[in-house]
Amino acid sequence: MSVERVQSDSPWEETIGFARAVAVGDRVLVSGTMPLVDGAVQGEGDPYVQAKTAFENSLAALERFGLDASSVVRTRMYVTHARDVEDVGRAHREVFGSVRPAATLVIVSGFVDSRVLVEVEVEAFRNTEESS
C-alpha cells in the first residue's frame, strides 16, 4: 500500500517537518490547519472567519486527491475560547451541511501564533476500489 503526501504553503510544514495531508489506502488525513493564506493569519479576532478559512484550506488539500467536503468523515476543531464555540460550529455547519461528519471540538490553551483562535483537522474516506 502506497502512501501519498501533499504540502501546502504553510511555513510550519518545513519548520516542524510534516505534510499538509497524507493518503494511505482509503483514508486521507489532513493535518492541523490554521487560518493562513499566503502565510498571513486571516480573520484576526474573528473565530468564524478563521474557522471558515481553516476548513477551506483543509478542503483544498483534499482536492489534491480528488475529494471534497462530501468525503469528510471526521473533523476536529480546536479553539482557544469557549465563547467562540458557536461561531466555529456555525462555520462547520455551513461547510459540511448535510455531510455531518463525526466531530470533536476542544478548548485549548493556545497555538503557535497567538493571533490564531481556531485550528482544524479533517479526515476523509476515498473509495479506492472505485478508483482502481
Image (cartoon, rainbow, N blue to C red):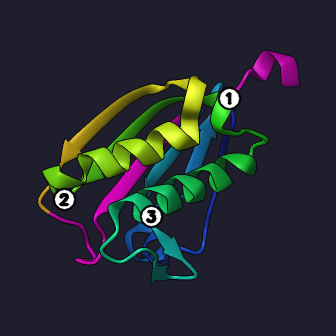
Can you name the residue that lies furthest to the left here?
109
Give, as a three-letter code, the residue at label 1. Answer: Met
- The residue stretch that appears in magenta: 110-132
Q: Position of residue 48 (x, y in %)?
A: 40, 58
Decide: few, some or many residues near mark 1? Use Cα within 10 Å; few <14, some 14-19, many ≥20.
Answer: few
Judging by the rendered image, the residue that carries numbered circle 3 is 49
Residue shown at 28%/65% (left/top)?
A: 117
Judging by the rendered image, the residue that carries numbered circle 1 is 1
User: Which quarter of the image is occupied by the N terminus?
Assistant: top right
Give, as a three-letter code, the residue at label 3. Answer: Val
Q: Are marks 1 and 2 in contact (CB under 8 Å)?
A: no
Can you name the residue that lies furthest to the top here?
129
Q: Nearer the viewer, mark 1 or mark 2?
A: 2
12 sits to left or right of 79: right
Q: Earlier in the sequence, mark 1 or mark 2?
A: 1
Residue 111, quarter of the rendered image: bottom left
The front one of 28 and 90 is 90
Judging by the rendered image, the residue that carries numbered circle 2 is 80
Q: Position of residue 122 (x, y in %)?
A: 49, 41
